[in-house]
Amino acid sequence: MIGIREPKKEELDSYYQLRWELLRKPWNQPKGSEKDELEEEAYHIAAFDNDKLVGVGRLHKNSDEEGQIRFMAVSQDYRKQGIGKTILSKIHEKARELKLNKIVLNARKEAVPFYKKLGYKKTAKSHTLFGKIEHFRMEYPFN
């Protein structure tokens, strides 16, 4: 059974390792590129299959009203099982707890349908990561 929760302090190395393996390593990015300056103040969520880490996601505040999701990923063998949707649901719970009015994210082109299905609206073309991965800005209002 898959459990979704905040990673414990002793699990953070594995959490960041999975982020790097899924989101940076395939693009030949160095270790450390899976983190940014907001890690300490962000809300982290992880999916576990027993003790095996299989999914990650993060929410941080851009302002008192707006949160941003970054570093969402689920291991290939665990996709299409509702894990990403459950991670997002936990992030939404935290956003409500923080009294945020909206969440924004920059979705990879192939992830746009996933977020649209869950109520996110595509608002603009964003950036192209590593010169290859097209991203789109998406928003989810809590009004």
Image (cartoon, grey):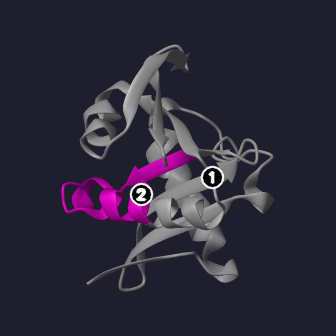
Percent across and percent down for residue 44 are: 60, 64
Percent across and percent down for residue 4 are: 42, 75
Q: Identify residue type, mark 1.
A: Leu
Which residue corresponds to mark 1? 100
Is 120 rendered above or below residue 47?
above
Q: Are marks 2 and 1 in contact (CB under 8 Å)?
A: no
Q: In this orientation, which residue lies closer to the viewer: 140 or 74?
A: 140
What's drawn in magenta, residue-wise? Answer: 69-89
What residue is shown at x 36% (from left), y 56% (from top)?
Answer: 74
Describe residue 93's horizontal placement relative to residue 87 as left or right: right
Mark closest to the chain's N terminus, 2 or 1? 2
Residue 104, quarter of picture = top right
79 in the magenta segment = yes
- Total numbered labels placed on residues in the image: 2
Q: Identify residue type, mark 2.
A: Leu
Q: Nearer the viewer, mark 2 or mark 1?
A: 1
Residue 3's disc number: none
What residue is shown at x 69% (from left), y 79% (from top)?
Answer: 9
78 in the magenta segment = yes
Is 114 rendered above or below residue 135?
below
Label 1 residue SS: loop
Percent across and percent down for residue 118 are: 30, 47
What residue is shown at x 60% (from left), y 54% (from top)?
Answer: 59
What residue is shown at x 24% (from left), y 62% (from top)?
Answer: 82
Q: CA distance from mark 2 to mark 1?
A: 15 Å
Which residue corresponds to mark 2? 88
